[in-house]
Image (cartoon, rainbow, N blue to C red):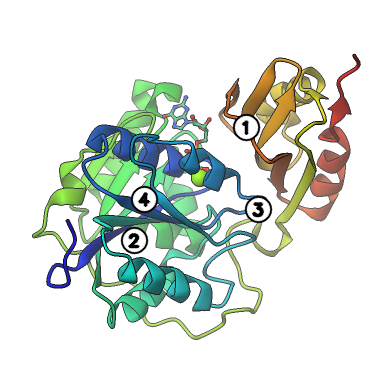
Amino acid sequence: MASTEQPIPLHLIAGPLGAGKTTAILHYLEQQAGQEHIAVVVNDFGSVGVDQSILGAAAPERPPTIKAIPGGCLCCTTPIYLEQALQQLAQEPAIDRIFIEPSGVVLLARLKQDVQRITAVLPVRLHSTVTLIPPGRIKETHYQALPFFRQLIDEADYLVANRCDQVTPEQQTVFREWTARLTPPKKAVWLTEFGRLPPHWFRDAAAPTNPSASAAMPDTHGQPHEHSAHDQQMVRGHWEAAADDVWDLAPLLAKLATAVDRQEQDGLLRCKGVIHTADGWRLLQWTEEGYACDPFPPQPVSRLEWICASPAAAAEWSTRLKPIRHAI
Ligand SMILES: Nc1nc2c(ncn2[C@@H]2O[C@H](COP(=O)(O)OP(=O)(O)OP(=O)(O)O)[C@@H](O)[C@H]2O)c(=O)[nH]1
Ligand SMILES: [Mg+2]
């Protein structure tokens, strides 16, 4: 139980779009099986809060408290929303642990500095920063060339190659060799799949996070800034529909299936949604590595969101991802 003497441990779970951040938090929720009251601050890349619904449907025996900060990225929006969320959680009587899942486009150094500033006056302590990387997608060359990836990796205490079921043993070796050369070395580098992280990373009271590895960043909240190779051109799209309307997923899935092949990706970076179909509600997940469509509890609305590498790609995918009504 949290008490006023014991600060609530807080963990940042970072990583690029679709790396497996939410999956890692779900895995932790499953592992601790209701022993702890967990809170999650989730900052989805889009405005329709799909991760919020996924986390809200988890651990029904002791559901997490969720604070959603939708619509972009915590390092661009004013930190007041994050501050409010953490202040509210700090006042709740029985939160044992807080996770922050920033969007997959966050500049991690800025976020970490904001979190450390905000928590300095709260009974909350930034305990650890975990970055998940899909090793098939992100290589040492990305780390060297792009500040976005460099921050994700430099700011991590624990570095994880997730989605290892989707890469070869050789690719895993390349990841191990590259990350072994990082200075300073990480507390741990872990290769896994489906966000299976060692629970002791979170419970080790003697392992506070390293301070931000970057020099203090100028306050450019609210101003456009670079995120990655795609940086300022990244464009989001979404649609929403009433819960009673029923949609055909097959045409959407066919288009998303071709997009897994990188030749046909056409600038799509990530897509996810919860949709009412003739077979019931479905959670649709698309990343560059693959896609899935699984049963999901009924929702107040159907919705799909996506993010693309350019305005032209976003215009194209808005057409391709238009919902198609189920014919009765
Ligand atoms: N094959 C495979 N799929 C995975 C793995 N980890 C996560 N996934 C799947 O990948 C999809 C995206 O995972 P998420 O956990 O939502 O990824 P995320 O980083 O939270 O995504 P964003 O918040 O949108 O950036 C889901 O369908 C997961 O089930 C893995 O190790 N292997
Ligand atoms: Mg997520």
267 or 22: which is nearer to us?
22
- Camera-nearest label, 4 or 3: 3
| Residue highlighted by disc 2 | 154
Kind of residue indicated by mark 3 = Gly
Kind of residue indicated by mark 1 = Trp
Mark 4 element type = strand
Q: CA distance from mark 4 to mark 3?
A: 20 Å
Q: Position of residue 56 (x, y in %)?
A: 48, 42
Mark 2 element type = helix
- Camera-nearest label, 2 or 3: 3
Q: Position of residue 158 (x, y in %)?
A: 26, 50
Quarter occupied by the C terminus: top right
31 or 34: which is nearer to us?
34
Residue 206, placed above or below residue 77: above
| Residue highlighted by disc 1 | 286
- Which residue does the image show at 73% across and 42% down from the upper left? 267
Mark 1 element type = strand
Q: CA distance from mark 4 to mark 1?
A: 20 Å
Badge 3 crowding class, 10 Å Cα cut-off, few under 14, some 14 to 19, many 20 or more, is: many
Q: Which circle marks residue 131 in the picture?
A: 4
Q: Position of residue 177 (x, y in %)?
A: 27, 40
Marks 2,1: beta carbons within 8 A: no
Q: CA distance from mark 2 to mark 3?
A: 26 Å
